[in-house]
Image (cartoon, helix red, strand yellow):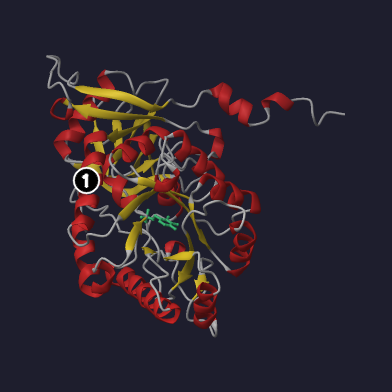
């Protein structure tokens, strides 16, 4: 999100009361930005292949029904990995043939439901494939089915998100002894197995490593098709994982750069013989969202200024627990939502949770924050406010999409500053009654003698 657009949205959010004493945290999503990213993704792959490409958004990156519906309207389907994510995608109206189900722990009931609904499934392991064997005869006609392999090409800078390490829990570990032969045989024994899937990891994986993983899977598909004497594998699911630049407003690397690199590294992937599935998450949404939070207090400890805000571990869980891997840019605004002026002061930006590590940013140079000011945690449109962490029973913040005049269909503008931004609530802020109900409120007497 460009900084002028961001400033305009923050100002309007404060003026229109999205952020208030009662609602000290709010998340914003730039609708035009999301649409532009979806268009970039489609264009990037359309430029390198004529074969059909299903772009399936990794729902875990933003499990919000209106966001999934928006992406669906922009030609982006859904990659789901749990019954909850499947329910969200269905609620958003995503058609079964525009979905794919991955996950390392699908139950028999989940598999049956997916096959009955006609949703493509990627089996994670031999045991799951055996379960699918038993179901395939009963599904009529069976949706596209595939197998996930781990090319074991190595990890990136964030171990927790590296799924192609030698011992990753995902897929069939391709370089393990006997594994490759087993996979080839598994396909030859199952003429209905027509897809091959890999996803080498998320944020922190170098593009070349992603490409190596995809090349390994392409070569395996070629080997299987040669052994089968026909184009048995007709679709390669190349996963997601395009990293996001959290250091500036620049959107880099781009989908076009990635598609171009893949075409260089794995030209055969794009010669029209293979349909493609992609599963991008973070790269579609991250730059288009931000979290706003009010500063409640400003204090100092050991001569370090500390701004105590309402956004912490509940919305920025990874940043708080692993700040070195997940640094976030923070922008400072005054109580009216105007960019805050003043000399930079090194300070901590803390959250509301009751543990010392609950910091959005440590030793950050910002204009000195004061009570009532507003901070914005930038690039948080993916995985942040939508993957809430319930620590301290802190509520899930409201999420509001916004459009500005330029993004408005009718081109009308209001006179008042800030009114030129229109917000649409995507998710209402969680209410205290809901927290109580989710926390056993209906069972108050259950444990009493
Ligand atoms: C998480 C995940 C993705 C999305 O990864 P991003 O880094 O958000 O693009 C895609 N596919 C699978 C199987 C995943 O687990």
Query: Is residue 445 in view?
Result: yes
- Residue 442 placement (x, y as % from top left): 70, 24
Helix, strand or loop under label 1: helix
Furthest residue to the top? 415
Q: Quadrant of ligand 1?
A: bottom left
349 versus 280 height, above or below: above
Residue drawn at x 52%, y 44% is 117
Across and down, in percent, residue 308 comes to: 39, 35
Q: In the drawing, does residue 434 fall left or right of residue 413?
A: right
Asked whether 370 or 255 is in front, the reply is 255
Q: Nearer the viewer, residue 194 or 172?
A: 194
Which quarter of the rendering shows the N terminus?
A: top left
- Crowd rating for badge 1 (residues with CA inside 10 Å; few <14, some 14–19, many 20+): some
Q: Is residue 45 left or right of residue 192?
A: left
Above or below for 443 versus 234: above
Q: How many marks?
A: 1
**Residue, disc 1:** 39
Q: Residue at x 54, y 40 (%)?
A: 391
The percent coordinates of residue 387 (x first, y second) are: 46, 43
Relative to the observer, which residue lies in front, 37 or 338? 37
The quarter of the rendered structure image containing the C terminus is top right
């Amino acid at each position: 999100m460009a900084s002028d657009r961001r400033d305009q949205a923050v100002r309007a959010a404060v003026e229109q009361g999205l952020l208030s004493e009662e609602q000290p945290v709010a998340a914003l999503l730039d609708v035009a930005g999301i649409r532009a990213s979806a268009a970039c993704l489609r264009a990037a792959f359309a430029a390198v292949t004529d074969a059909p490409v299903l772009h399936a958004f990794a729902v875990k990156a933003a499990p919000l029904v209106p966001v999934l519906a928006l992406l669906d309207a922009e030609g982006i389907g859904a990659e789901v990995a749990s019954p909850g994510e499947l329910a969200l995608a269905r609620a958003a109206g995503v058609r079964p043939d525009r979905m794919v189900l991955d996950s390392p722990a699908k139950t028999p009931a989940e598999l049956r439901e997916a096959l009955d609904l006609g949703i493509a499934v990627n089996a994670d392991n031999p045991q799951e494939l055996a379960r699918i064997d038993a179901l395939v005869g009963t599904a009529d006609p069976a949706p596209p089915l595939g197998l996930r392999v781990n090319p074991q090409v190595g990890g990136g800078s964030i171990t927790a998100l590296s799924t192609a390490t030698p011992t990753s829990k995902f897929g069939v570990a391709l370089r393990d002894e006997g594994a490759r032969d087993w996979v080839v045989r598994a396909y030859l024994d199952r003429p209905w197995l027509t897809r091959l899937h890999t996803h080498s990891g998320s944020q922190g994986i170098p593009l070349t490593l992603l490409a190596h993983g995809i090349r390994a899977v392409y070569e395996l598909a070629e080997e299987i098709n040669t052994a089968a004497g026909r184009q048995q594998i007709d679709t390669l699911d190349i996963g997601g994982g395009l990293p996001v630049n959290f250091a500036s407003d620049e959107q880099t690397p781009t989908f076009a750069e990635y598609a171009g690199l893949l075409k260089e590294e794995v030209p055969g992937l794009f010669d029209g013989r293979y349909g493609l599935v992609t599963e991008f998450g973070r790269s579609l949404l991250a730059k288009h969202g931000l979290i706003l939070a009010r500063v409640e207090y400003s204090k100092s400890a050991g001569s370090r200024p500390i701004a105590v805000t309402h956004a912490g571990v509940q919305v920025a869980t990874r940043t708080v627990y692993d700040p070195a891997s997940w640094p976030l840019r923070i922008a400072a605004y005054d109580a009216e939502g105007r960019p805050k002026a003043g000399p930079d002061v090194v300070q901590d930006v803390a959250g509301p949770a009751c543990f010392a590590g609950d910091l959005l940013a440590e030793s950050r140079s910002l204009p000195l924050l004061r009570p009532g000011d507003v901070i914005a945690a930038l690039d948080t449109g993916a995985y942040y406010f939508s993957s809430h962490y319930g620590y301290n029973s802190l509520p899930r913040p409201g999420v509001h999409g916004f459009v500005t005049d330029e993004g408005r269909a009718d081109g009308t503008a209001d006179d008042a500053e800030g009114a030129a931004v229109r917000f649409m609530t995507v998710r209402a802020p969680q209410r205290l009654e809901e927290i109580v109900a989710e926390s056993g409120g209906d069972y108050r007497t259950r444990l009493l003698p």
